[in-house]
Image: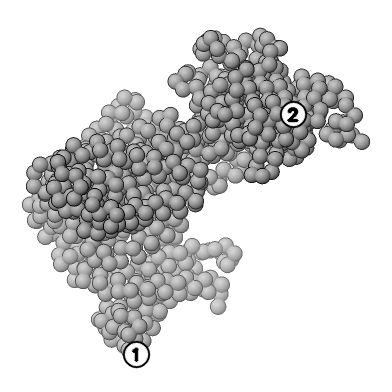
Amino acid sequence: MTDTTATTVDPRPDHTGAGHRGDTLLELEDVHVFYGNIEALKGISLNVARGEIVTLIGSNGAGKSTTLRAISGTHRPRSGSIRLAGSAIHNLPPHEIVSKGIAHSPEGRKVFSRMSVFENLQMGAFSRHGERIDDDVARVFDLFPRLRERRSQKAGTMSGGEQQMLAMGRALMARPSILLLDEPSMGLSPILTEQIFKIIEEINAQGTTVLLVEQNALMALNAAHRGYVIQTGRIILADTAANLAANEQVRQAYLGEI
Amino acid sequence: MQPWMKRAAFLGLLGGFGALHVSLVGMVGTFQARDFISGIVTVGSVLPMLIAILVGWRAGILQRDTDVAPTPSRALASGAVAGAVVGLVLALLCVIILNVDVDWIFVNARPQLAEILLFGQGIGVGSIILIVGGALLGAAGAALNVVSGPVARTVTIAAIVTLLVSLMEPFLGAVFRNLSLNVVDDFLYDRGGLTPIGFVLVYALVAAGVYAWATRGDRARARVEAMPPDRQRNLKLGAYGVIVVLLLLLPLIVGQRLSEVVGTVGIYVLLGLGLNIVVGFAGLLDLGYVAFYAVGAYVTAVLTSPASPAFSPELPFWGALPFVIVAAAMVGLFVGAPVLRLRGDYLAIVTLGFGEIAREIFKSQWAQPVTGGAQGILSIPPPLPFDRDPQSIYYPILFFCILAAIGASSLAASRVGRAWNAMREDESVAEATGVNTTYYKLLAFGLGAAFGCVSGALFAAKIGVIFADSFNILVSINALALIILGGMGNIFGVVLGALVLVGLPEFLREFAEYRLLIYGAVLVIMMILRPEGLLPSRVRRAELHEDEGEDDAQYAAEAGEETGKPVVTT
């Protein structure tokens, strides 16, 4: 597949799967986010290297989704810095952040329910004004064959799993260098969850960096390279996914073991 | 009493209340002056008849829980009971009117009303006519449920069209006379209504047309769809061509006096197209749209009128137009920017306030040196340098309407239209997919404002005189009502809505007094029977009927998921 956006400073991947892991792609430093007077994030620092799957696990209300919203610009942090490939993005409006290469698949299968599957995907590529999207649509349909069958079906009439696939596919249409996934397994059956995680790994293998927020810590740690544990707005643990999965504290709190 | 009879009687009471209402507010009396079928039935007595038919129709839809078997005869009986109750209520009204002096409470409750309702008979015979007639009409209404679908549709639509043709006598008659078709006029119309022969002819023609369409329409459509695409396009272009030619000839067809009305409809079409961008496309409920209309009118008046207090070198209409559009965009941004963060109801209330503020400013002492305050601005020149005759003013209005329609439809199909669509569905997700919501909201406000301002400019030039009080909230409501009625998001819907809500009342002078009552009734009925409007856009229809029939698909899909059927298959 040829990259039609071959500019010199394009942080987007070339989809060849030859992701050069190592250099830091996304970096959060001491990010504080408030909802009114309530401090939801009390100084989050984390980084994601190019080509990684990094997961952010934690309980309900710990600040996982808020972290993603801060990154995608839909909720601006009060202080701290967020950098993408070295340049600060925390003061940019959401649409500019999308065109810089961060795509956010929001929590709760937020698809445009009255649009068809294809129209949803078309909206996903909204930031890429004037480019051809046929290849990207084909790529999404290869990842999610089920969507191809339902190409002209209205998104709201599909099952929860299909809507989740569509939300992910729509995010991919922006050709992001990093994909923010918010609870992709929420409300799905175990079989479907497994499928979704397989696809996440596949997306990553094709060269897209993934920051994954999950309550299903076991699945998330299985898929991820590294992980952060977030609790009441603070990062309390950071390690490789394998170490976190083995960590006694994590096992008790998040993996349901006593 | 059996349950179905109870229900029918209840519906009859409701209908009776409606019939009381139209009688006591004076509609029956006013419309008595107009014949529906000359010498046989007046429009005044058609009103209660329609109510009897309507409740009969409703009562004829038997409910499963009240009836063991919804047989046709039971449906007819049910309708007859409901209709008879309507007649009974009216008969009681007549008894009261004739015996007690109540016109100090209800001005219209005079013996004349009783005479109309009783068909000129005495109370004894008249009451029997009312009740038996009501029962028959109710049964006829119920029969619509018994006969087959196409037949019922044919009968109903033909009746409605015939009634409209009769009501539009002042309009159609004038058109025929204007075209020197006096023969047709004499043949069809007499004393403000259809002649009996005219009635039969119109009804038969419409019924034949509707029935043919109901039974063979699908085949005709299939044949058009089977044509090769370029022929389909030619057909479409041909149809548009015919429409444009008709529109160009319209002032000549309808004549001098009615061109005035057609011009007013055109101004509202333009207003509706502009509001449709804001409300229908972008989903921002703007109740202060009149502000833009007022700005357009005032900018035109100040720049072009020699009587305007402020600006002395007078521009021609077309010279003022660029300033109007600039002013529009500025006001659009001025109103749009502070309300960007508001959604839904809050936006509606704030824009409502803006509309009122605009009017008060134009009227105020403070603005008097520019706007003339309460005196308004007089002697605004017409857009074309001829006399101010409605036929020549029509053409600029038509020009802008066509321009606006083309503009709006190409916007809807473009990237901008997609962004609006996404914003209307879910603003935060639209934002997350990279839609600059601030920009697209302001764009909607700005474009809507431009359309509204041009509409106001044409209004000022057409009327020649403007006062701040012409720009009241009713203009906003009219514009909103016409896009709701016509079908939100659809351009033909806007035109149809303007014709029905602005055009019809102008043609039907008797309606003027009851305009708002009829508006209200029409909108309520529309929201119940067809919330997507007369000519809905595809998306709107989907939005308003999304819970019908699609749930099943979703359940089926989810059931498949539950049973662990493989979901991702190749």
Q: Amino acid at mark 1?
A: Val
Residue B287 left/right relative to A69: left
Which numbered disc covers residue B100?
1
| Chain of the residue on which disc 1 is drawn | B
Disc 1 versus disc 2: nearer the observer? 2
Query: Mark 1 falls on what kind of element?
Result: loop
* Residue B255 in picture, x, y percent from top left: 12, 51
* Residue B515 in picture, x, y percent from top left: 30, 63
Q: CA distance from mark 1 to mark 2?
A: 82 Å
User: Looking at the image, which is closer to me, B235 or A44?
Assistant: A44
Check disc 1: other Cα within 10 Å, few if <14, some if 14-19, many if 20+.
Answer: few
Q: Quadrant of residue B449?
A: top left
Q: Amino acid at mark 2?
A: Leu
Q: Is residue B500 above or below residue A115?
A: below
Which numbered disc covers residue A56?
2
Name the quadrant of the N terminus of chain B. bottom right
